[in-house]
Amino acid sequence: MQIYLDNSATTQCSEAVKNIVVKVMTEDYGNPSSMHTKGVDAERYVKEAAAAVAKTLRCQEKEIVFTSGGTESNNLAILGSAMANRRAGKHIITTAIEHPSVKNAMRFLEQEGFEITWLPVNEDGEISLSDLEAAVREDTILVSVMMVNNEMGALEPVEAAGRIIHSRNPAAIFHVDAIQAYGKFRIVPKRMNIDLLSVSGHKIHGPKGVGFLYIKDRTKIRPISFGGDQQKGMRSGTVNAPGIAGLGAAAREIYENFETNTERMYELKAYFADRLRTLENVKLNGKTGSESAPHIVSASFLGVRSEVLLHALEDRGIYVSAGSACSSSHPSAAGTLAAIGLDRAHQESALRFSFSVHTTKEELDAVFEALEELLPMLRKYRRF
């Protein structure tokens, strides 16, 4: 039996997503920009996907721009809005626990002469709203805050943040990385004062290589890639009709039975967290209740390096992650855990368990039993 608990890294495509992707790739394979029937048929899938996504966000279809995924969505949001508004100021605010696709875009802008304020977080990975309020200035053009942290599931107060940002500086643009939040929370950008919102398809049982950026109507932003002016020039390039069709199907599915699925994941998270607390020298990182994301549990297993425990679990058909799959090969892999004040021993022994709607209590019991057996053995043979 295989147990997959790395759903924050990627999810298994649903059957409906697979079917529509294959259909568009093999039957309705025209270029959506072509004027003949094949092109019109392909364009229909793109329009239907935009309608499906817009319905989940209660926004207009024209406010959805399809991209190649979360990284491109974040880059377009940050670089595009910075370039479009730099005459108004060069001050940008973000947090110390952002995804590398945000952090590295910010570092690039620093090299280009922008001033970046990095907000700290508390031990639960949450920003302080008073820190945010104090940081917003007249020359602040952009604030970027992730809604759910990808490494430990911290939930940021984005709705309150949006109110503060726009009350302090109505011209400032508020970007939210919702890549780990979309499908886990009801998100209504206009109500939450969000101007830009990034989403990736493969986090919600959709295809890899596709995502979208919500751009609130009249938000001042420039494209960062140029070509044939597809998607009204905001994101040029042949539109990925199969991937977009799959993303639309995934968006529809993920918000069906939303309350039931989310409540169930919270119950599983609480159950698994309680079981982990019974193990010796195990520390849970961050909150585990409804004030956190429903699908992520981060824990440090003191005395065992994370990669050693990861591979020991893998030998038993259990798949988890040592932090973020997007940063695990880089020296900054433990950025979030360092930011919340964990010492090196706890950072280097941390694993992330991330659930999906398919995760079962029986699977979590099997993981716990494997940990209960492996930890004493691995600690016995640890090296210093």
Image (cartoon, rainbow, N blue to C red):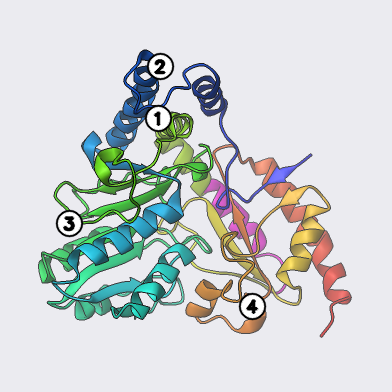
Q: Which x, y percent locates residue 133?
A: 20, 75
State which quarter of the image contains the N terminus: top right
Task: Estimate how packed mark 4 is, as few (under 14), some (14 to 19) or many (20 or more) residues with alpha carbons within 10 Å.
Answer: many
Q: Is residue 246 above or below residue 129?
A: above
Residue at (63%, 83%) from the top-left corner? Answer: 344
Q: CA distance from mark 2 to mark 3?
A: 34 Å
Three-letter amino acid code at the position of disc 2: Lys
State which quarter of the image contains the C terminus: bottom right
Contact? badges 4 and 2 (CB < 8 Å) = no
Write down the region rendered in magenta.
Answer: 267-281
Q: Which x, y percent locates residue 262?
A: 45, 42
Q: Earlier in the sequence, mark 2 or mark 1?
A: 2
Q: Earlier in the sequence, mark 4 or mark 2?
A: 2
Residue 38, numbered label: 2
Residue 358: quadrant of the picture: top right
Q: Element at badge 2?
A: helix
Q: Is residue 247 above or below residue 316?
A: above
Q: Nearer the viewer, residue 298 or 200?
A: 200
Q: CA distance from mark 2 to mark 1?
A: 25 Å
Task: Estimate how packed mark 3 is, as few (under 14), some (14 to 19) or many (20 or more) residues with alpha carbons within 10 Å.
Answer: some
According to the picture, the residue beneath numbered tag 4 turns out to be 346
Q: Nearer the viewer, mark 2 or mark 3?
A: 2
According to the picture, the residue beneath numbered tag 1 turns out to be 252
